[in-house]
Amino acid sequence: MPFEADRAVPGLIVKFGDYPLHHGGVGAIRSLGRLGVPMYAITEDPYTPAASSRYLKKSFVWPTTGTEDPDHLVEGLLRIGRRIGRPAVLVPTDEEAAVLIAEHQDVLAGRFLFPRVDPALPRRLASKQGLHELCVEHGIASPTAAFPQSYDDIVAFAEKARFPVVAKNREAFLRRTRPAVNGTTRIGTREGLLRLARDWGERPGVILQEYLPREDAEDWIVHAYFDRNSTPLAMFTGVKVRSWPPHAGMTANAYVVDNPELADIAARFIKQIGFSGVIDLDLRFDRRDGQYKLLDFNPRMGAQFRLFENESAVDVVRAMHLDLTGRPVPEGEQRAGHRYIVENIDLPALLAYRRSGYTTPHAPARASGTELAWLAGDDPLPFVTMLARFVRPGAKHLYQLWRTNRRGGKTSSSS
């Protein structure tokens, strides 16, 4: 290892909501734990894959939904900080956590370390409407979008729209009890849109977006860490080969692919908005007009971040820990051709993609190396725990997602 982390400063995985099979959290525990950094994590129960990692010093069992009163969540975080007993680097794994930390950073700063940022910015970036407005303001390409305020607005939109269109929850980072749509929903006809919209209430919380056909598009991802001056200390680009549900969900298989143009777009946008911290971006290259269109901005670590590591063994989580503890972040080229596989969802995704005939033109013919999301020779228990929890309910969940996808409702997540 060409660098040493500050082992006196622990890390804390912060997650709100019930999603125990989260490989990103396991990846972060391993990434810093292998450097000798003491790792802690908030978990739904004592039997999650993250809780079983050999690199986890202690799990704090705290079931949450992400919809609790913010003061309650802040107090819970502070209570955990007191139990850890020394300042810890916060590693949020969802938008709820990233937004909470940003909006309460003055209260949390005495107990934790995290990138300081405009308190309102992460919430705006995680919002579909807020992100679209920022893209327009700073000249970043994004899909054409409308933000209806009433059913009449939707009727007017339907008269002029070119179908299919895509509907998303406007405030997608909030896990509401009854969201307007189930993730990203592709709507094929005017009649279908009007039928769905009748259930969205007087003030529909949706964004209606142009559909970028997959036969004319490529899915790209950017992961990076930016310091307090919005300067990239670690920057990576890659292509998403498969996702689950197909073409609209969580990354199941991806490759590291050099793309200087895309890296420049991301770096320029981050500098313009003044963001600091880890980012996970989803962009779709539209071959029809030659533009990279920003679909999602996750102001936190992405679940597939372990795809990316530079020649100095730095990933975005390590870069953050090094920077926040006052240590230099070693530079290096990314591992072009490296592959990432999420074992429990890549097989069904592979079968679905073979049926559709879709391929990713920029994926290498042969991987230069492979990183598995769950299985690791030095830390096998998270994989075993995942299997034990996944087999029956996981298979049922995959089937439900597939059925939703077949009906035209596609759950989108870049995690």
Image (cartoon, rainbow, N blue to C red):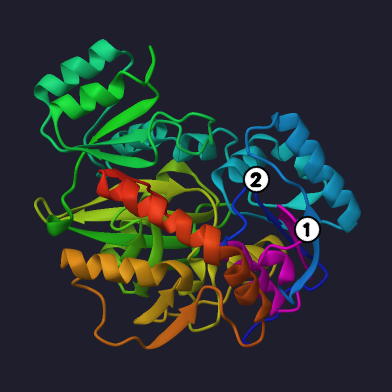
User: Which residue is label 1 attached to?
Assistant: 88
Q: CA distance from mark 1 to mark 2?
A: 18 Å
User: Which residue is label 2 attached to?
Assistant: 16
Q: Nearer the viewer, residue 42 or 388?
A: 388
- From the image, which quarter does the N terminus lie in? bottom right
Coordinates of residue 411 in the picture (x, y in percent): 37, 47
Can you see residue 253? no
Q: Confirm whether the magenta stretch covers residue 134.
A: no
Coordinates of residue 357 in the picture (x, y in percent): 15, 68
Amino acid type, callout 1: Ala
Determine the image quadrant of residue 379: bottom right
Coordinates of residue 180 in the picture (x, y in percent): 40, 28
Residue at (77, 51) in percent of width and height: 112
Can you say whether 406 is above or below 106 in the image? below
For label 2, the crowd category at 10 Å Cα-Cα, with few meaning under 14, some 14 to 19 and many 20 or more, is many
Can you say whether 64 is above or below 224 in the image? above
Q: How many marks?
A: 2
Query: Which of the two marks, 1 or 2, is nearer to us in this view?
Result: 2
Secondary element at tag 1: strand
**Which span of residues is magenta-colored?**
23-52
Residue at (16, 37) in percent of width and height: 188
Can you see residue 70? yes
Amino acid type, callout 2: Phe
Residue at (78, 53) in percent of width and height: 61
Can you say whether 245 is above or below 73 in the image? below
